Image (cartoon, rainbow, N blue to C red):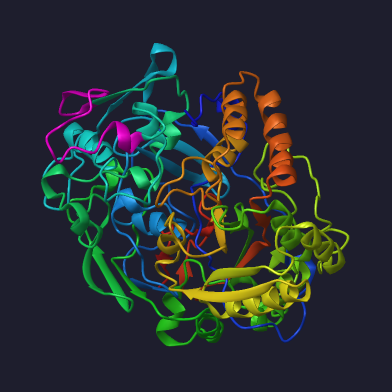
Amino acid sequence: MRVRKRSTMAALAAGLLVLTGACAEGNQGAPATSSSAPAASAEPFKPPTITVGTAEDSKGPAIEPEGVVRGGTVTMIDRDDFAHFDPGQSYVNTATNFGLLIHRGLTGYKRVAKGDYKLVGDLATDAGTVSDGGKTWTFTLKDGVKWQDGSPITSEDVKWTIERTFAPFITQGPTYVQQWLTEADHKKAYQGPYDGKRLDAIETPDDKTVVFKFKTPHADANYAFAMGGYAIVPKAKDTKEKYDKEPFSSGPYVIKSHVVDKTLDLERNPNWDAATDPIRGAYPDKWHMEFGQEALQITDRLMADAGADQTAFTFYASVPPERLQQVLGDASLAPRLLKSPSPYGNYYYFNLDRVKDVKIRQAINYAWPSKQIQQVSGGPAAAALPTTILNENTTVGYEPYDLFGKTTKPEGDIDKAKELLAQSSNPTPTIVYAYNQTPVQEQVTVVIKSALEKAGIKVVAKPLDRKTYYDSIGLVKNEFDLYWGGWGADWPSGSTVLPVIFGPVADGAPNYAHLKDPALTAEMDKITAMADIDEANAAWMALDKKVQETITPLVVAENRIANILHGSKVGGAEIDPQFWIVSPNTIFVKQ
């Protein structure tokens, strides 16, 4: 199986970052009027400390942020509504971050202090008990955990939740646990519980105990259960596809009203008990969310800090290029400005079903206008220019390489691109480039088209709907040649990046390149099985380079740096280092 048999627990305990899946493209705006903002604002990424907590750590309530105030209404302003409310369909950081307000899972991350986290039991009494050499995991549910109607959350709900992720209509969420319970092609092995068939590998000896029996050892499975895609769904309220629009809450809030693409309002869940929840503070009484606002509008509102916008913030709208220098240079805004380099990898994937000639793929890499894209994005303060698939900020044993001269010729090497095209099967190819239709990406598209056409490559640009962007590029039979995609390590190792983005090919799977290479699969399986973590980390880094050198399935994209403002009466705002998005867990409204 192309999943982990890893031994990364020591690395995790040493304070490395655990990341969560695909990321939404949150940088928007129009082109910069100046080429860059001060590079000094791009602070180095500092991985948080993450350790495994105890049963005592798993008790609520959550640790309060300094100066916390309870009550009031907080407003969240962003560009897009959420594509999915069903946890099983949630793998993009925006959806899983929002899910913290209405969903709970077996485990989760407790904020002890800024940059200091513990993996603890969320609905479970602790982070789980492992036995049988790592093959068996047992969780016991807490007393008093309830659904929004007051009914108890049971082990049957937990079993049902995992089983339903095998159903054909679930296409977007994580697949680690499913593969560990069955096989790599988990949907071939089992099609979900709706026809009455159940998984013997999940046992529920009583209403509060659930036992998972994996095919192979997974000593870090409790980290997988902390992923938002494995939040619990009530068996009695499961409406299959409809659940994606009408979720049932186990978290501190319930959805009061939802006008799609316009507003979303939350109010307190009377059956959520803070004493059972070590993760969510849930300090505001109400949440009001507004969608359809571009980053420029959001930034201008938050800069002005007038009236109701004093109690407003944004989950992910980074300051756009044309405001960046102004914001970074205004000392009065500094207390309200959050900064964080991205822990994700960002790529422009080739659809290998359509772009079959490696010479063409390599030519595009050489012609790639990295510097121009950085300038359009706001300069070095808004974007870095990595050269590797694995992110240097979150990869243990990272070793740099630069196959395509991005460091020496960041503006692109047109002559080298032309040379490779002349050796290819088609010296004047046409590339269909699909992109997320945001203001910045419109400008990035112009830059990409200009550079590639200088090399002799015709570019046909296809804008995609923002909210369903990943759904569109996630179709195996899509009609695009090249498209952007982000990925974050689910654990701090190449084992949660390369085997995933080059893993099984299926609708919704993150292998957007459709790379199917038996030799590569065998090599990834070999590295995954390595007992020596240092040896494995070195092997992942070497494989990173080998993949780009011999297959070239993607272009390594710019790595964004978030600069996010909030209103003056918003307290507890922090960019969560796991999601690269402002966490709702510590937000409160100042009086």
Left/right placement of residue 473 relative to residue 125 reads right
Which residue is rendered at x = 49% and y = 81% of the image? 294
Q: How many marks can you see? A: 0
Which residue is rendered at x = 34% and y = 55% of the image? 99
Q: Is residue 56 above or below residue 551?
A: above
Left/right placement of residue 315 relative to residue 291 reads right
* Residue stretch in magenta: 186-209
| 499 or 43: nearer the viewer | 499
Which residue is rendered at x = 28% and y = 75% of the image? 260
Residue 67, how many percent across, how many down? 47, 60
Query: Which residue, as the protein is rendered here, is positioned at the far front?
Result: 425
| 217 or 402: nearer the viewer | 402
Residue 377, how many percent across, how many down? 67, 74
Q: Is residue 194 above or below residue 320?
A: above
Residue 205 part of the magenta segment: yes
Displayed quadrant of residue 335: bottom right
Residue 546, how many percent across, how many down? 73, 39
Residue 246 part of the magenta segment: no
